[in-house]
Amino acid sequence: MRTSQMLMPTLREVPAEAEVVSHQLLLRAGFIRKSASGIYTYLPLAQRVLKKIKEIVREEMDKQGGQELLMPIVQPAEMWLESGRWHVYGPELFRLKDRHNRDFCLGPTHEEVITILVRGEVRSYKQMPLLLYQIQNKFRDERRPRFGLMRGREFIMKDLYSFDRDEAGLDISYQKMYQAYTNVFNRCGLKFRPVEADSGAIGGSDTHEFMVLADSGEAAILFCSQCDYAANIEKAAVPAAGADPTAQALELKEVSTPGQKTIEQVAEFLGIAPHQTIKTLLYRTDKEVVAALVRGDRDVNEVKLLNALGALTIELADEVQVRQATGAPAGYVGPVGLSKIRIIADPEVMALSNAVAGANKADAHYINVNPNRDFKADIVEDIRMVQACEPCPKCGAELQQARGIEVGQIFKLGTKYSKALGATFLDENGKEKPIVMGCYGIGVSRTMAAAIEQNHDQDGIIWPASIAPYHAIVIPVSAKDEKQMQLAESLYNKLNQIGVETVLDDRAERPGVKFKDADLIGYPLRIVVGNKAMTDGLVEVRQRKSGQTDLIPLDQIPEKVKEILATL
Amino acid sequence: MRTSQMLMPTLREVPAEAEVVSHQLLLRAGFIRKSASGIYTYLPLAQRVLKKIKEIVREEMDKQGGQELLMPIVQPAEMWLESGRWHVYGPELFRLKDRHNRDFCLGPTHEEVITILVRGEVRSYKQMPLLLYQIQNKFRDERRPRFGLMRGREFIMKDLYSFDRDEAGLDISYQKMYQAYTNVFNRCGLKFRPVEADSGAIGGSDTHEFMVLADSGEAAILFCSQCDYAANIEKAAVPAAGADPTAQALELKEVSTPGQKTIEQVAEFLGIAPHQTIKTLLYRTDKEVVAALVRGDRDVNEVKLLNALGALTIELADEVQVRQATGAPAGYVGPVGLSKIRIIADPEVMALSNAVAGANKADAHYINVNPNRDFKADIVEDIRMVQACEPCPKCGAELQQARGIEVGQIFKLGTKYSKALGATFLDENGKEKPIVMGCYGIGVSRTMAAAIEQNHDQDGIIWPASIAPYHAIVIPVSAKDEKQMQLAESLYNKLNQIGVETVLDDRAERPGVKFKDADLIGYPLRIVVGNKAMTDGLVEVRQRKSGQTDLIPLDQIPEKVKEILATL
């Protein structure tokens, strides 16, 4: 393609609406344009990147025995009523009515459609395993769409669903997808980690998130510096619990701590370390108000807390609720003498001796608090955030923290949908059983954005070669110099002929403008045909990523370019 | 792929819901399943066909300089309000609201989105021509979805939009697309005709429909037996008008025709030919009631009539309206003495002399009606249907009639949308002008169905090789015979290695079942490994289309199969 004919509208200014780098660069480099909040048109350059990501995804799904199909975007409400999700799924679900006033929604996901489809076609264990997938636009009416393609309302997903006869089959399907996802993101040239994640309200099932590492990532992840352990910070398990308290228990005593409300203030006031205090936070769930205890130097992990309580929703209690439950103002709450509400404590708290905690009245704390002697916990369970530098729960080496962008998730659904929708099969003994399912998603448009978050500099995008819209751009320094143009054109043709996807910048622009656009768009290779080409037969090949620039004889260009590309 | 692992749910019975062959066969051969009225899931076999059609479309669009992009499915109402179509587009438009109560629709077409996009990016004549296209699900809330994929509510379209500086540019873009469409349907292996079609209310612009020929087609087309003239019957032009009347005009006379209402009855009763009578039909448009006159042996073409009257809607007047306008019951209406309403007459009528027409009272007709003497026409214009066997308007040879399925349409939009939406550019002289546009659609899922309507027999589908889900199926006669299975498997592997997309039927089914499924699904080649393979090293290769069966030595199979495929 020639730039003079391409729809490639680069912008000099950073658009005001764009908060994150990928959004800024996708707009500036002419990859996307907004149609409505969270709804974008993918321009030709973006469409080429998307096609490459989709093709990689397809190949890896197919390699694992996946079969591609295409389900409808418009889904009848009946299916969602049958699964029980029509009334549960919140305002994120785009709903609409047809001309006969029947209810439909725009698919945010396809568990209902595919389970009902499979229910109609699969009768015997012999017909499984089945791995069915599609690549398609999905819809989610986000309350606050933002960050460009990161959190849009219409986006492109690959969703695969596995159907197995039992858990053992599901394990195999899950492993296949784990491998396929690893291959996909490796082939996309991205640095990523599969991390253990929280499986939410369903509970118990395995799930991994695939995180593209980037400082701008929304999610915090912890990974081991030695072994392959990695987890979403919400999921990260604590190391083996500490020993029981051995220090001699001293007498419980109330001390005056006027105006000392935070852990830091109390610890400093009493001349102790924060880890010798008990942090008591009151939460309100959909069922009750509870006191959650973690060591003073720790933070409560609300996801773990929610799961431990078996609750659906959770939030911090307000001032009034705190006073009602404890009689004290916030800042002076503690577990001793707390009788109206349940107490859930982190194991680290139960391992403390002679600790400090609020006394449930203003301006007072207890010292020498000893768990089990001075208070009982109704539940003892890991409810704290793990931090960087703590030991890995798997091997004991030090954990490191990083930020990531979730681009994929694999999930063991089990029989949730097959039971709800009656998707059963007959096993060898003619016994009817529910099909065991998994679901596996990749955010295709999100992967494009994540690739940019991870791979850019102040000049623009740095595409990994495998998903770059084109591999190379040929730039004649002077578009007016006919001989230079001819040379550039012949190079351009040659490279395309040997499968190097090449653009020719034939615009009548200054070289500076062309260089800036080339860097902004992020072609892996920039090939400049200038005076040296005419005088010495040498052409400049610059690698976008490393900045390495080589002068290469004209006749060696095709071969050398292929060589360099293979290393990118 | 092995059939034992494929989701390929064939049915023995013809599903009761399916009226047309393509719908029946798509269901029976396991290509589609219904999710809701007019909304289908494309199963893996269909998805493979769709991918092939899409790829052919892409290549031909790209060849003409098309650039692929991807616009959103969910479109904001503001865009449609700006173009003026929000309130005009009827209940076919799926409308929905987001969580903030803002109006959106599901795109049935993308003129608004693309014109607004281009308005923002194109400033100069230098940036054109631009040919932008996408392949995507489209939505139309049909009143009565039916015929499977023929008239669905969610379907797959390729839509391309051309942007040019002037009509001359548009002509070139239009010709490029005409060529591209011709290539696409040729490469899909379909018999088709591009036919002149009616451009509707916009008027004046060129448009062609691409019709796949099939007896079950919804549209009637006329084409010349000699030259390349072809037109939708609604558009087909009449041959050069006949000479003026030369017979001597006799005296107008009323005759009694008791109970003779139809042209046939009147002609027989009076002993004349139907073409000597005047057929007078009263229509009601959005503006008026009119009398439309065609010769007694002709039919009124309502599309031509609508255009000639410049009306938006048209329907036959009812009994009451007929009586109000003429004083006569239906069957006795004629132009003589008709004063309350306008008369529009076909030129053939004006060329009659001494004709018969209704007398505007019960049981009476006039004979010796001479146009211009006995009545005046307010409008004289071609408003009749052309019929097979009439002379071609281009070369005079005989026209033939066929039925077709519209799978593509190309259309000169002109400046309709660019003016409405303010998409302008500056020409060489710095003068602001509206962009001249064209739009060009291909029904991708419809093409799949049309291919079946054209290519099937009582046993199932007969895919053209270029869009078949697979090229060949290898069937071992006895799945229990280990040696046969090994041989079949090795053939299957070999063929796939050389790019012949091959399925292995490894199911433990009787050969009859496998043959029936193979015919139903319509693999172009069926390769049977039976006893002859073991004894004489011969394998049976049967062509689905011709039924030709060859016994081919095992070692020549790959080469021969490739040869045969090249001829299909």
Image (cartoon, coloured by chain):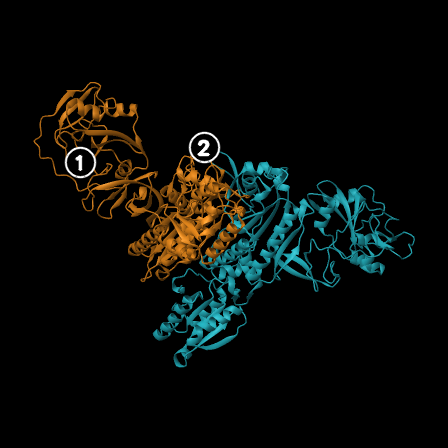
Chain colours: A orange, B cyan
Residue A296 percent coordinates (x, y): 20, 30
Residue appearing at x 59%, y 36% in the figure: B82
What type is the residue that disc 1 sits on? Answer: Glu
Can the viewer see residue B169 in this picture? yes
* Number of residues whose C-alpha sits closer than 10 Å to that of mark 2, classed few (under 14), some (14–19) or many (20 or more): few
Q: Is residue A432 left or right of residue B317?
A: left
Q: Nearer the viewer, mark 2 or mark 1?
A: 2
* Protein chain holding label 1: A
* Number of residues whose C-alpha sits closer than 10 Å to that of mark 1, classed few (under 14), some (14–19) or many (20 or more): many
Same chain for the residues at labels 2 and 1, yes or no?
yes
Residue appearing at x 18%, y 24% in the figure: A268
Residue B332 percent coordinates (x, y): 81, 50
Residue B37 percent coordinates (x, y): 52, 50
Helix, strand or loop at label 2? It is loop
Q: On screen, A188 above or below A263?
A: below
Marker disc for residue B295: none
Q: Nearer the viewer, residue B374 or B89?
A: B89
Separation of residues labelled 2 and 1 (CA atoms)? 47 Å
Marker disc for residue A348: 1
Q: Nearer the viewer, residue A224 or B528?
A: A224
Which residue does the numbered mark 2 point to in the structure image? A16
Which quarter of the rendering shows the N terminus of chain B?
A: bottom left
Which of marks 1 and 2 precedes in the sequence?
2
Residue A326 percent coordinates (x, y): 23, 24
Q: Nearer the viewer, residue A278 or B564?
A: B564
Helix, strand or loop at label 1? It is helix
Can the viewer see residue A359 in this picture? no
